[in-house]
């Protein structure tokens, strides 16, 4: 059972649909927090990506929007949905929030569906009527929806099943969709179709969409803004365009340089070492042992996000050092296209 240490009094009114502020999550037996001071927001109609390697905390962060935490965990900070503190919800109010406000789409659609029940039954269980089930299937682009509601999962392809799962998620008319690696198991063509569908639903219904992926190139191409996570922390948050063209954090640059692109002449450079586990502790920046720009000070520097000129943030001592030394009190570090960082213009 999660013990929520609420700090809700000072939570600002942001207008965001989902507003996570300073969320720290501790689990029994772990040497470090599962999430450490995580802050992020999703506005209505916005597509936001959470990116990072396995174990970085992105799925745990997304599930916090549903008030879902590991057994025995302790949470502090704030998770607000449309102004309501989710950490304070219990009983019927928590069940109603999970059933109606936020919907989660998993990676494997076959795991979400009962193999012996019909597609129509799956949609009715999620709040649709028999007639609206057909309309829901049509709205997610499934051809011949009258026939599909009578079919069982083994009669549909993976792409069709993911459309059924998305239809099920929409049945309760949620305002926020959490897509957890929702296209990772699909072939490239089907993946593009599902991404186009989700973007269309976002525009049509004004849904907020939190898109969890390990693929930074996909996130940059598909989302409005991107949060990059490492070792349970947000290390960079930017608009997708800025992240892709001028990544500020060495970890972000590492993710970009080890992701394949259509340009077959660009060699891939894997990030050395392995992602930290929950038994690893840090005296300074968690990325120190894998970072090609690490300095002695990184081993004792506690990461703090620094605001960038474009309104994003990065938590790296190189960004902080250049911004504070060269740009003055109101100056911020300026990430360059070649990956270096130098002082930027003053922004009040
Ligand atoms: S703080 Fe140091 S180790 Fe961490 S990302 Fe920046 S340069 Fe690398």
Image (tube, rainbow, N blue to C red):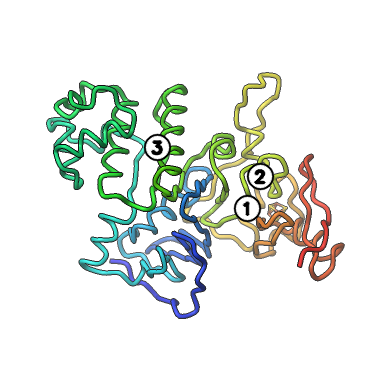
Disc 3/disc 1 C-alpha distance (Å): 23 Å
Disc 1/disc 2 C-alpha distance (Å): 8 Å
SS assignment at label 1: strand
- For disc 3, does the CB lie below 8 Å from ligand 1? no
Local packing at callout 3 (Cα closer than 10 Å; few below 14, some 14-19, many 20+) is many
Local packing at callout 2 (Cα closer than 10 Å; few below 14, some 14-19, many 20+) is many
Local packing at callout 1 (Cα closer than 10 Å; few below 14, some 14-19, many 20+) is many
Q: Is residue 13 left or right of residue 171?
A: right
- Residue 270 position, x and y percent, is 63, 34
Rendered image quadrant of residue 220: top right
Q: Nearer the viewer, mark 1 or mark 2?
A: 2
- Residue 46 position, x and y percent, is 50, 49
Asked if marks 2 and 3 touch (Cβ < 8 Å), the reply is no
Q: In the rendered view, would you say 176 is above or below 327?
A: above
Residue positioned 51% across, 58% down in the render: 41
Disc 2/disc 3 C-alpha distance (Å): 22 Å
SS assignment at label 3: loop
Find disc 3 in the rendering and name its residue: 182
Q: Is residue 53 left or right of residue 303?
A: left
Find disc 1 in the rendering and name its residue: 236
Asked if marks 3 and 1 touch (Cβ < 8 Å), the reply is no
Residue positioned 33% across, 33% down in the render: 140
Q: In the rendered view, would you say 290 is above or below 44?
A: above
Q: Is residue 93 left or right of residue 228?
A: left
- Residue 262 position, x and y percent, is 62, 22
| Quadrant of the frame with the N terminus | bottom left
Asked if marks 1 and 2 touch (Cβ < 8 Å), the reply is yes
Find disc 2 in the rendering and name its residue: 243
Residue 223's label in the rendered image is none
Rendered image quadrant of residue 333: bottom right
SS assignment at label 2: helix
């Amino acid at each position: 059972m999660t013990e929520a240490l609420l700090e809700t009094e000072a939570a600002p009114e942001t207008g965001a649909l989902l507003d996570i502020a300073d969320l720290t999550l501790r689990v029994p037996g772990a040497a470090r927090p599962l999430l450490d001071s995580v802050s992020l927001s999703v506005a209505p109609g916005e597509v936001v990506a959470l990116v990072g390697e396995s174990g970085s905390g992105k799925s745990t962060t997304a599930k916090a929007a549903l008030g879902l935490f590991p057994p025995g965990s302790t949470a502090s900070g704030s998770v607000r949905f449309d102004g309501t503190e989710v950490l304070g919800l219990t009983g019927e109010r928590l069940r109603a929030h999970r059933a109606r406000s936020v919907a989660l789409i998993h990676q494997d659609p076959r795991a979400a569906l009962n193999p012996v029940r019909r597609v129509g039954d799956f949609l009715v269980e999620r709040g649709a009527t028999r007639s609206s089930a057909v309309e829901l299937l049509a709205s997610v682009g499934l051809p011949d929806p009258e026939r599909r509601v009578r079919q069982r999962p083994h009669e549909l392809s993976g792409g069709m099943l993911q459309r059924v799962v998305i239809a099920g998620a929409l049945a309760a008319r949620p305002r926020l969709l959490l897509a957890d690696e929702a296209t990772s198991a699909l072939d490239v063509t089907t993946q593009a179709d599902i991404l186009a569908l989700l973007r269309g639903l976002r525009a049509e219904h004004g849904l907020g969409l939190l898109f969890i992926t390990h693929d930074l190139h996909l996130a940059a191409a598909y989302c409005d803004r991107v949060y990059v996570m490492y070792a349970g922390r947000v290390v960079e948050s930017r608009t997708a365009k800025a992240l892709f063209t001028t990544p500020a954090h060495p970890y972000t640059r590492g993710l970009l340089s080890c992701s394949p692109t259509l340009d077959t002449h660009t060699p891939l450079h894997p990030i050395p070492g392995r992602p930290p586990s929950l038994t690893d502790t840090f005296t300074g920046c968690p990325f120190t042992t894998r970072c090609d720009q690490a300095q002695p000070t990184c081993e004792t520097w506690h990461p703090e996000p620094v605001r960038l000129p474009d309104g994003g943030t990065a938590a790296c001592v190189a960004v902080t050092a250049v911004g504070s030394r060269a740009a003055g009190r109101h100056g911020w570090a300026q990430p360059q296209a070649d990956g270096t960082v130098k002082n930027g213009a003053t922004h009040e």
